[in-house]
Amino acid sequence: FSDKPGMTFPKMNRFAVLLGLAVWTLRYAVAPAAPPAPAATSLSEVDDDFFFQGEFSGQVVGLGRCGLQLIAEGGGAFRGVLHLGGLPGDGGGYGERFEFPGRREASTVLLSGDDAVIHVQLGSAVVRDGSGRQRGFLQRVVRRSPTLGLAPPTNARVLFDGTSADAFADGKMSPAGYLMHGAETKLPVSDFHLHLEFRTPYMPTARGQARGNSGVYIQRRYEVQVLDSFGLSGETNECGGLYKTKRPDVNMCLPPLAWQTYDIDFTAARFNTQGKKIADARITVVHNGTTVQDDVAIPNKTGGGKAEAPVPLPILLQNHGNPVEFRNIWLVER
């Protein structure tokens, strides 16, 4: 605007400015946010692509034992990840991996790479080279965590067994009887062993942090990420990772709607009488029976966690807007 005394905008210019501000406000300031991606929490809600995704294992000529993870990405689109050595935690997942984009046509998902094509059906996958020769056969496998359904020992504090959410502030149960995200233990925690089972929803059109996101926030300071990371590389913000601190040693995430387990040993940070930290918190995380964080020192709070202090705080099952469910939660204090 002019800084000369007595100068004003013509009436039409003032109207144009006000009109522009109104349009901007309607478009950006008060416009509704994009709706979240659809999330299925039961088989009655899934699409046909759901039944094709999953894991396959077998032999490929020239590569040896391999594991394939097939990820549904919505509208018939798929992504395949071939792991040399086998599926993650079963000989593979620590080394080379190859990604193949693909699509579903009727009863087959066709994954295509530079020099290989993989034909996937409901129960098996056939690997062919560029000339069409069969080079491998992979059989579908359905893996379960070896600690799934683990019963609490006699000295455990049972936090959730499906009968009540009373051990949690803001604890809500789903219609199926599971604990919903957003719950926080009423009692604070210090040193413990925790068993917890979780299930991420099926959200094929979502990506990254918008896909089955929650977290186990220990003392509301340190987050073990919960996310639908099936088939991803395994980063600090993916399942099994210490958020923005350390990636999992291997990505053990199972497909969405599969029940998964965390078995966590935690030792709280130590402080002297003046309130100065003298030892970092330490954590071991076993994801679906495989150690993905092995006695790791946590140098500071993770992400948006509460500041470190001598006072213990509760465990928060983070609410990130995705319908992540939990069950069979118990804790043994040390």
Image (tube, helix red, strand yellow):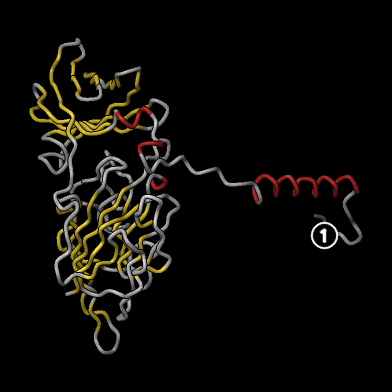
Foreground residue, 226 or 308?
226
From the viewer's perspective, is 259 left or right of 150? right
Q: Quadrant of residue 244?
A: bottom left
Q: Amino acid at mark 1?
A: Asp
- Residue 73: x and y, percent? 37, 32
Considering only vertical position in the picture, is 59 above or below 164? above
The residue lying at 9 percent from left, 30 percent from top is: 65
The residue lying at 41 percent from left, 31 percent from top is: 74
| Count of numbered badges drawn on the protein | 1
- Residue 117: x and y, percent? 24, 18
Q: Quadrant of residue 16?
A: top right
Query: Circle 1 sits on which residue?
Result: 3
From the viewer's perspective, is 124 left or right of 4? left
Considering only vertical position in the picture, is 69 above or below 305? above
From the viewer's perspective, is 5 left or right of 64? right
- Residue 116: x and y, percent? 21, 19
Foreground residue, 43 or 310?
43
The residue lying at 31 percent from left, 75 percent from top is: 188
Q: Residue furthest front?
A: 163
Q: Quadrant of the C terminus?
A: bottom left
Q: Secondary structure at mark 1?
A: loop
